[in-house]
Amino acid sequence: MRSRQRKLAVLMGMGMWMLASFSGCAGKATRPPPQTVGDTTVESSPVTDLLQHHRHHHHGGVLMLITISLDTLGLSPEEQARIEEIRSDLVAKMGPARSDELQLVELLANGLEESSLDPTKVNGAIAQMATSSEAVHASAIGDLNQLHAVLTPPQRGTLVDKLEGHWQLWKRANTGERRPTVAIGQEIGLTPDQIGRVQNQLDAQTPPPSEHENEIQDYLRDFSHAFRADTFDAGTLKAASGANRHLAEWGATRLARFCEVVNPMLTGEQRQKLVALLREHLDHDEGQAKE
Amino acid sequence: MTRLLSYLRKSALVGTLCATALSLAGCYAGTGYAVGGDYDDLPPDFVVTTEPYYFEGRPVYWYHDHWHYRDGNHWRYYRSEPAPLRQYRSQPRLQRPAPRVYERPSPSRPPAARGAPPGGGGRPAPSRPPPARGGAPRGDGGDHRMPRR
């Protein structure tokens, strides 16, 4: 009897041990620590580069995020060469929207230089850029279809992962911890008090962009689902044009509102720095080889 | 009493076998290798700046001493490093062309050097066309840190 009880105890103990051993396999694991890089602390970080790009360049909307996602797919030289052709086409298709964005930024820089921003002109330039960004999807349908055809299913999955990552970075650079008030504010030497006052005014006047964000999010989900599938037709993605418009308009508006609000608070040196910063970014949107 | 003991023993056996089977299913999760837990995301900073390596028909990333891959809405990692991936990591990486740079690192640069055209306005010269890129899959060469450009 004792022997049986002992056997039973041993058996149950083994069962408990095995359960404990394997339960950790499929359960929630400790999440790897984030590798967030602040813009101003690691100046050579590739993430800094991308955050700045996402803060200053919005033309093309989601299509710009897709285009940047092509940079790190991990392809063979032959595959990458083919992708570069498609990438160049996509950049060209976004050309009109880029021109409109340059006009907007020039308008902001010139207005700041003269301490006088014309809200009507600024809003008109934003609307123009949003409209041209809305149009890019129709012209890029063939390129997106080609992209799907050239990539293998795992590579398509990689593109979708990159796209989602860039969307997260875009939000951080425009509405999150590295939004213009903080990132540009630090770059041009705003005091904490100035940053606080700018942020308060922006919070009071900028409506919550939840509808735009939801539309963009929905389109990203639709695109991701469609692009992972074996067959793909970008022409069926009806939400694309609206999402491109919203992203472009949203980002450009936040930058413009920041300029308008900070304009009367700037010292001479801060003004000079902001104007120079805006003009510097006029030349930075297509990606260059590192020298 | 004997019946009761027999019943308990059988129950324990069946329960243990079921639990083991379920656990193992989770551990291997459709791969031939033991996998670890899941979590919502790899940091987007890492994903967007790192080239994956392709293994078992999917992109995998070496991050914090494990190979990670997406499984539906979650990321998982291999509990122990599959031999082909270990071999891949041990190989010298082929030289890759420099990745694209979108912006210049402006924080440390004086304002005068930030490309403001002389005399104020005016549009700077257009960007150079992007160069063709290529090279073998980069992975990250066994380094779990953020790759530097």
Image: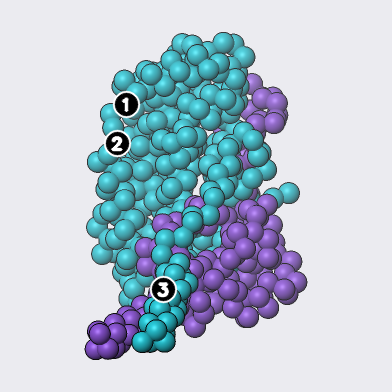
Position of the N terminus of chain A by quadrant: bottom left
What residue did someone put label 3 on? A16
* Left or right: where A138 falls relative to A65: left
Residue visible at 34% across and 56% down? A220
> Residue A146, located in which quarter of the rendered image?
bottom left
Q: For mark 3, name the chain.
A: A
Disc 3/disc 1 C-alpha distance (Å):
57 Å
Q: Local crowd at mark 1 within 10 Å, few (<14), some, or many (≥20)?
A: few
What residue did someone put label 2 on? A209
- Which tag is nearer the camera, tag 3 or tag 1? 3
Amino acid on which the number 1 mark rests in the picture: Thr
Camera-side residue of A89 and A231 = A231
- Whether residue B148 is visible, yes or no, is yes
- Whichever of callouts 3 and 2 sits on the residue coming sooner in the sequence is 3
Residue A221 % position (x, y): 31, 58
Residue visible at 72% across and 73% down? B90
Q: Local crowd at mark 3 within 10 Å, few (<14), some, or many (≥20)?
A: some
Callouts 2 and 1 close, C-beta under 8 Å: yes
Disc 2/disc 1 C-alpha distance (Å):
8 Å
Residue visible at 53% across and 48% down? A34
> Residue B18, located in which quarter of the rendered image?
bottom left
Q: For mark 2, name the chain.
A: A
What residue did someone put label 1 on? A206
Residue A240 % position (x, y): 30, 54
Q: Is residue A167 above or below residue A119?
A: below
Query: Helix, strand or loop at disc 1?
Result: loop
Amino acid on which the number 2 mark rests in the picture: Pro
The numbered dot on residue A107 is none
